Image (spheres, rainbow, N blue to C red):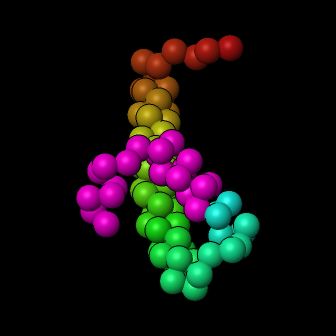
């Protein structure tokens, strides 16, 4: 799983996850194939969560830094 996290970007993982869901919803697969698709979907969902959590942390950090700068009076106010 750790390899998957570093090997796939968010968009690639999301697109593959969409395809996995499409195939599961379409049906026509064996039980083994469905289970394998489900497991891959879980892995891909985790990759997407990883990327989104990282993006959220970066955004939170940038917002906190901006607030601190504004509190010190050295930030610019846009508006």
Residue 79 appearing in the image: yes
Residue at the image position 58 percent from the left and 62 percent from the top: 20
Residue 65: in magenta span: no
Taking the magenta stretch, the answer to whether it contains residue 14 is: yes
In the rendered image, the vertical position of residue 23 relative to residue 65, given as above or below = below
| Residue 35 x/y as whole percent | 52, 81
In the image, the segment drawn in magenta is 1-20
Q: Main secondary structure of the magenta part?
A: helix
Nearest the eye: 59 or 77: 59
Q: In which quadrant will I find the C terminus? A: top right
**In the rendering, at what x and y percent does residue 31 appear?**
58, 85
**Can you give x and y, in whole percent of width and height, for residue 67 in the image?**
49, 33
Taking the spot 53% from the left edge, 77% from the top edge, the residue there is: 33
Query: In the rendered view, would you say 75 is above or below 17?
Result: above
Describe residue 15's horizontal placement relative to residue 2 as left or right: right
The residue most toward the bottom is: 31
Q: Is residue 47 above or below residue 1?
A: above
16 sits to left or right of 27:
left
Q: Residue 38 placed where, x, y %?
A: 54, 74
**Residue 53 in view in this figure:** no
Front residue (pair 66, 45): 45
For image coordinates 56% across by 57% down, the residue present is 17
Task: Count up the numbered dots.
Answer: 0
Between 22 and 13, the residue placed more toward the observer is 22
Q: Residue at x 59, y 81 (%)?
A: 30
Q: Quadrant of the N terminus?
A: bottom left
């Amino acid at each position: 799983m750790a390899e998957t996290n570093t090997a796939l970007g968010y968009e690639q993982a999301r697109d593959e996850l969409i395809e996995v869901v499409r195939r599961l919803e379409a049906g026509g697969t064996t039980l083994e194939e469905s289970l394998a698709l489900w497991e891959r979907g879980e892995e891909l969902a985790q990759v997407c969560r990883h990327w989104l959590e990282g993006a959220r942390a970066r955004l939170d950090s940038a917002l906190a830094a901006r607030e601190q700068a504004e509190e010190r009076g050295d930030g610019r106010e846009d508006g």
